[in-house]
Image (cartoon, grey):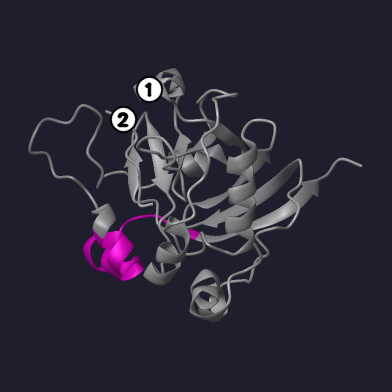
Amino acid sequence: MSIRRLVLPMLLVGAASCALRGGSRRAAVNLNAAVPDSFLVAFETSRGRFDVMARTEWSPAGVDRFYQLVSARYYDDARFFRVVKDFVAQFGLAGDPAVTRAWRVRRLADEPVRHGNSRGTLAYARGGAGTRTTQVYVNLVDNARLDTLNGFGFPAFAEVVSGMMAVDSLYSAYSPPRNAPPGAPPGPSQDSITRQGTAYLVRRWPKLDYIKTARIVKEWRSP
């Protein structure tokens, strides 16, 4: 079973600008701002905190996008809507559908896999060439096959450096296991999340864990 792609200048103005900010809860972000060589992000979740170190040398385009998304508070209130035991924990569809729509068109350039999908690393979900956007998964185990899956692989861009116990404890009962038999309940619908956001998940899948906030807490830049 492959990782499924999740529909997944300066700040845009007018209506697009409002969508990127997501109203008063979102932060305006300069998409041309210089990105650090590495930075630490604190994820406060319904299961506790975990910290992620993003490393530009692993995936420059992926890290740039992650910096923009976290700076814009994109991941605040996002659910971990696909958690497959002994595989991955996936998130990245915004709680506000307007915010998801504003970012999903900003696709990332493809990159080679410079660092593998070892336990605790993060990578973008993708379904083919030029399809990475905002959707991210955390490897719950070593997933070396994802380095080359479907001929393109999934480049890791960051890693959990503390709090992996919180990631391991994310609610997983809604997601079908790997190699689930035909006809198994599919779990939350990505299309419905895209259209309805958190409202759909709270109504249909109330036990999902979620990100309260994701904030950059430290940066490292070359002199």
Q: Name the spot of residue 107 as percent of width and height, x first.
A: 48, 49
Q: Answer whether residue 38 is visible to the viewer in this image.
A: yes
Split into 4 quadrants, where in the image is the N terminus? top left
Q: Name the residue at 50% across, 74% down.
A: 16
Q: Quadrant of the C terminus?
A: top right
Q: Which residues are magenta?
A: 192-211
State the image coordinates of residue 95 (x, y, percent, origin top left): 41, 66
> Does residue 56 show up magenta in the picture?
no
The quarter of the picture where residue 195 lies is bottom left
Please, is residue 22 above or below residue 77 in the view? below
Q: Quick one: label 2, few (<14), some, or many (20+) residues within 10 Å?
A: few
Residue pointed to by mark 2 = 2
User: Which numbered dot is residue 149?
Assistant: 1
| Secondary structure at numbered mark 1 | helix
Q: Amino acid at mark 2?
A: Ser
Does residue 147 appear to the left or right of 216 in the view shown?
Answer: left
Q: In the image shown, does 148 or 44 lie closer to the viewer?
A: 148
Report crowding for label 1: few under 14, some 14 to 19, many 20 or more residues within 10 A (C-alpha): few
- Side of 216 where 115 appears, left or right: left
Q: Amino acid at mark 1?
A: Leu
Would you say the magenta stretch is mainly helix, strand or loop? helix
Q: Earlier in the sequence, mark 2 or mark 1?
A: 2
Q: Position of residue 48 (x, y in %)?
A: 53, 52
Q: In this view, which residue lies farthest toward the right?
A: 223
Residue at position x 44%, y 60% from top?
78
Query: Marks 1 and 2: in contact by CB < 8 Å?
Result: yes
